[in-house]
Image (spheres, rainbow, N blue to C red):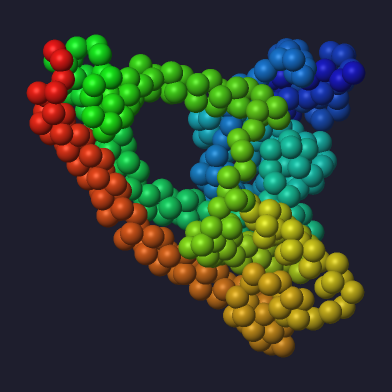
């Protein structure tokens, strides 16, 4: 059974590097590192990760990878060697988890492995990332690969930021409403009903409903719910393969109105991925496989991924896409133009712009409706509370104090 070791080492030039290595024992680990031309200064066995133990693994995000790709592209374009570029990145990186990964990649590169293989061996980068590097590495254009990766990640980062910014105000309204109702049910309603004693049997029906709601809509109940949610997410972080969230996203694709938003979102992401991968020189079949795997909704991912086999049989790309029932007619039409002109890459970029614009406009239309709906619902609930309190006061003469 292989054991994982964390190491610090020096190369022939005296530069320090660190990383992870798997070996049968310490002797084999040291021997492997020496074969890479490294002098081991520290070697520590890491605790094995079994199924009954948990590990709170520190991750790096898309922004970190974007910065790495952008800086590597700049350094390689200036004529710097790949190993020197990695050494500069490792020195400048402040996030420990990312530094360890880059050190591992650098060690593999120095041992003679390819750049794509070195990234792939870490198990922390997706297949699209690896394929874009692999194709450009084969033709000696690594700086182009990292530049295309940086552009794609920049699109992803901006896309997510736009969605977050768009949802900020509706989320604020919802949170403000929740806090308002908690205050009402925690302080105002209980004090009002306290003047009628503990016997609520003679209260009007609306008053009984309001009184019952005040019994469990309070900060104590909220604390219990928040605690359960926190435990669930911590357990999901520690045991990601055992604790999973219910797949609500796939179900949303069946709701009227929401269905078109999700479709535009997925097609926008898919189209930009096709453009970025084709721009890197990846063949169409492989580009389609990689881009289809990035589609989050299973209802859309399966039909598009199944097109690979039909295209391999020699069928025209536009005709194959035309068979997918949920795709708008503009998709096969534009692909037919791109196929005939030999310019599919730009057609996918045009499709990305079209679906991106549709998604943004759809979000705006939804928010135009969501914001007043939240206000109306909040007004109805507050109105129900006020009317109930008034009816209770009016019927006070029939209540035995």
The relative height of residue 312 versus residue 87 in the rendered view (above or below) is below
Quick one: which residue is furthest to the front in this view?
398
Q: Count numbered badges in the picture.
A: 0
Q: Is residue 75 above or below residue 189?
A: below
Which residue is rendered at x = 54% and y = 48% of the image?
A: 66
Please say whether residue 16 is visible from this viewpoint. no
The answer to whether residue 283 is left or right of residue 254 is right
Find residue 156 and report its horizontal and vertical position in percent: 53, 54
Q: Is residue 321 visible?
A: yes
Q: Residue at x 16, y 20 (%)?
A: 399
When the figure is inspected, residue 112 is found, relative to residue 237, above or below; the finding is below
Q: Is residue 37 left or right of residue 364?
A: right
Question: What residue sits 86% from the left and 25% below the top?
Answer: 32
As rendered, which of 236 and 30 lies closer to the eye? 236
Residue at 68% from the left image edge and 53% from the top image edge: 298
User: 1 or 280, which is in the foreground?
Assistant: 1
From the image, which quarter does the C terminus lie in?
A: top left
Where residue 13 sits in the image (x, y, percent)? 69, 30
Residue 25 in which image quadrant: top right
**x, y percentage for residue 389?**
16, 31
Depth order, front residue of 382/123: 382
Where does the N terminus fall, quadrant-wise?
top right
Examine the image and state in which quarter residue 37 appears. top right
Q: Quadrant of residue 348?
A: bottom right
115 or 124, which is in the foreground?
124
Q: Position of residue 74 (x, y in %)?
A: 55, 53
């Amino acid at each position: 059974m292989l054991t994982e070791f964390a190491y610090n080492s020096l190369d022939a030039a005296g530069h320090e590097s660190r990383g992870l290595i798997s070996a049968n024992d310490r002797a084999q680990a040291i021997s492997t590192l020496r074969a890479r031309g490294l002098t081991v200064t520290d070697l520590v066995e890491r605790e094995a990760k079994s199924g009954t133990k948990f590990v709170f693994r520190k991750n790096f995000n898309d922004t970190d990878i974007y910065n790495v790709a952008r800086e590597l592209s700049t350094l390689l374009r200036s004529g710097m060697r790949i190993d020197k570029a990695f050494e500069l990145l490792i020195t400048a990186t402040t996030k420990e988890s990312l530094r360890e990964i880059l050190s591992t990649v650098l060690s593999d590169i120095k041992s003679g492995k390819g750049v794509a293989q070195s990234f792939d061996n870490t198990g922390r980068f997706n297949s699209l990332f690896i394929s874009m590097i692999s194709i450009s590495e084969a033709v000696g254009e690594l700086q182009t690969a990292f530049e295309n990766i940086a552009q794609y990640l920049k699109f992803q980062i901006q896309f997510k930021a736009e969605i977050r910014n768009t949802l900020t105000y509706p989320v604020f309204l919802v949170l403000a409403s929740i806090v308002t109702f908690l205050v009402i049910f925690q302080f105002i309603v209980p004090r009002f009903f306290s003047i009628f004693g503990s016997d609520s049997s003679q209260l009007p029906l609306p008053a009984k409903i309001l009184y019952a709601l005040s019994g469990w809509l309070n900060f104590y109940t909220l604390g219990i719910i928040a605690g359960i949610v926190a435990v669930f997410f911590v357990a999901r972080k520690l045991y990601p393969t055992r604790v999973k969230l219910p797949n609500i996203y796939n179900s949303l694709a069946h709701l009227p109105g929401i269905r078109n938003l999700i479709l535009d979102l997925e097609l926008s992401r898919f189209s930009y991925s096709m453009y970025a991968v084709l721009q890197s020189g990846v063949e169409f079949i492989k580009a389609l496989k990689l881009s289809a795997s990035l589609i989050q909704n299973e209802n859309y991912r399966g039909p598009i991924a199944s097109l690979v086999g039909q295209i391999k049989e020699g069928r025209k790309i536009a005709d194959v896409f035309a068979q997918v029932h949920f795709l708008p007619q503009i998709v096969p039409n534009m692909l037919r133009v791109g196929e005939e002109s030999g310019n599919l890459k730009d057609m996918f970029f045009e499709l990305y712009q079209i679906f991106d614009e549709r998604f943004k406009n759809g979000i705006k239309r939804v928010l135009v409706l969501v914001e007043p709906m939240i206000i109306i619902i909040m007004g109805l609930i507050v109105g129900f509370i006020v009317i109930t309190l008034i009816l209770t006061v009016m019927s006070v003469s029939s209540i035995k104090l």
